[in-house]
Image (cartoon, helix red, strand yellow):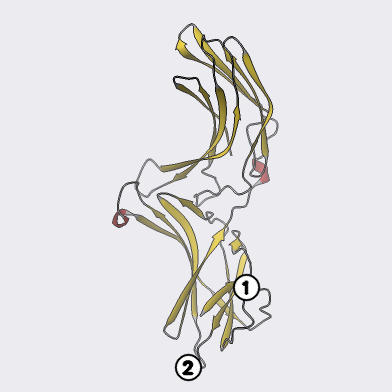
């Protein structure tokens, strides 16, 4: 048996109708027998360093697909026309509006799958769910400035970083243009400066107050030498936000938030400046 969906990429969105086909090769014993097809969405969470026996399984979506009269299956890619199927069953089901997107982290995942059972045979196929982005979250009016100073070697000789963002709310697929000034007031030269855009995703466990977190670098940029007593200016530095930012929330409020992290390095030690600047 083979399962096919109406999308080559097998990516759907909450609230959409998923159409597919179950193709059977072998002749069945009962010509009137119908398959059963179920769709599930689930999350598995495992604390780092523990075994699979201690993982938590959360089933947040389950539905039975509806069989429909046979229709044109040419758009159900990639059905192989050369395969001699004895039966083809067309089905569909509707995704709820509040589904969390598919997501993979080292300690767990959120996945969706279709399972088909027919005449003692069984097969399954995974598909992905993306996230609708609400444009009402966009706010171009707010302007937020972040300025802070950290002592690099002693209290009197510091490195000062001034960060400036044009807005505090951004959407996936947008580019952040960052303004920054680094003043090296120390006695030592800085061999490089680096800025990171960090995404943090939270997984909330049942009966736990604190969530598990997973962070990843989604954008970065490196600048060079800053001599003692001089400064470095970043003008319109682009940091690109990936077009698809998955979350693990089962409501309409996203879990994602981002940090702007600046790292300065001299020949002996590293200093990390971290300032949370905006949410998405």
Which is nearer the eye, 190 or 221?
190
Which is nearer the eye, 14 or 53?
53
Reading the image, the residue beneath label 2 is: 30
Residue 266 appears left or right of 15: left
State the residue at coordinates (29%, 57%). Answer: 53
Secondary structure type for disc 2:
loop
State the residue at coordinates (45%, 54%). Answer: 109
Mark 1 and mark 2 lie on one chain; the one further toward the N terminus is: 2
Q: With respect to residue 212, does 264 lie above or below?
A: above
Q: Which image quadrant: the C terminus?
A: top right
Q: State the image coordinates of residue 220 (x, y, percent, origin top left).
A: 58, 35
Q: Residue furthest top?
A: 156
| Label 1 Cα neighbours within 10 Å, binned few <14 / some 14-19 / many ≥20 | some
Which is nearer the eye, 232 or 162?
232
Q: With respect to residue 18, does 86 lie above or below?
A: below
Q: Where residue 78 is drawn, which disc sits there?
A: 1
| Label 2 Cα neighbours within 10 Å, binned few <14 / some 14-19 / many ≥20 | few
Q: Where residue 117 is drawn, which disc sits there?
A: none
Whether the residues at callouts 1 and 2 have beta carbons within 8 Å, the answer is no
How many labels were placed on the picture?
A: 2
Secondary structure type for disc 1:
loop
Q: CA–CA distance between discs 1 and 2?
A: 28 Å
Q: State the image coordinates of residue 260 (x, y, percent, origin top left).
A: 56, 30
Q: State the image coordinates of residue 82 (x, y, percent, origin top left).
A: 62, 83
Residue 139 appears left or right of 249: right
Q: With respect to residue 85, does 14 lie above or below?
A: above
State the residue at coordinates (36%, 41%). Answer: 209
Residue 217 appears left or right of 205: right
Which is nearer the eye, 187 or 254?
187
Q: Nearer the viewer, mark 1 or mark 2?
A: 1
């Amino acid at each position: 048996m083979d399962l096919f969906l109406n999308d080559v990429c097998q990516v759907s969105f909450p609230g959409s109708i998923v159409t597919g086909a179950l193709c059977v090769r072998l002749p069945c014993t009962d010509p009137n027998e119908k398959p059963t097809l179920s769709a599930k969405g689930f999350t598995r969470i495992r604390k780092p360093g523990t075994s699979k026996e201690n993982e938590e399984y959360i089933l947040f979506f389950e539905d039975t697909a509806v069989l429909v009269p046979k229709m044109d299956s040419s758009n159900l890619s990639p059905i192989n026309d050369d395969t001699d199927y004895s039966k083809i069953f067309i089905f569909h089901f509707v995704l709820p509006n509040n589904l969390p997107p598919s997501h993979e982290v080292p300690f767990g995942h959120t996945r969706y799958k279709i399972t088909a059972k027919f005449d003692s045979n069984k097969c399954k196929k995974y598909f992905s769910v993306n996230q609708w982005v609400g444009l009402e979250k966009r706010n171009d009016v707010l302007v937020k400035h972040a300025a802070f100073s950290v002592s690099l070697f002693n209290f009197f000789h510091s490195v000062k970083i001034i960060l400036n963002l044009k807005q505090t709310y951004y959407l996936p697929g947008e580019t952040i243009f960052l303004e920054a000034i680094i003043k090296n007031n120390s006695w030592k030269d800085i061999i490089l400066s680096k800025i990171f855009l960090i995404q943090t995703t939270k997984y909330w466990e049942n009966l736990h107050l604190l969530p598990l977190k997973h962070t990843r670098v989604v954008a970065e940029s490196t600048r060079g030498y800053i001599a003692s007593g001089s400064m470095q200016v970043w003008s319109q530095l682009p940091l690109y936000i990936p077009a698809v930012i998955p979350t693990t929330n089962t409501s309409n409020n996203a879990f994602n938030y981002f940090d702007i992290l600046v790292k300065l390095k001299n020949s002996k030690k590293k200093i990390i400046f971290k300032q949370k600047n905006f949410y998405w």
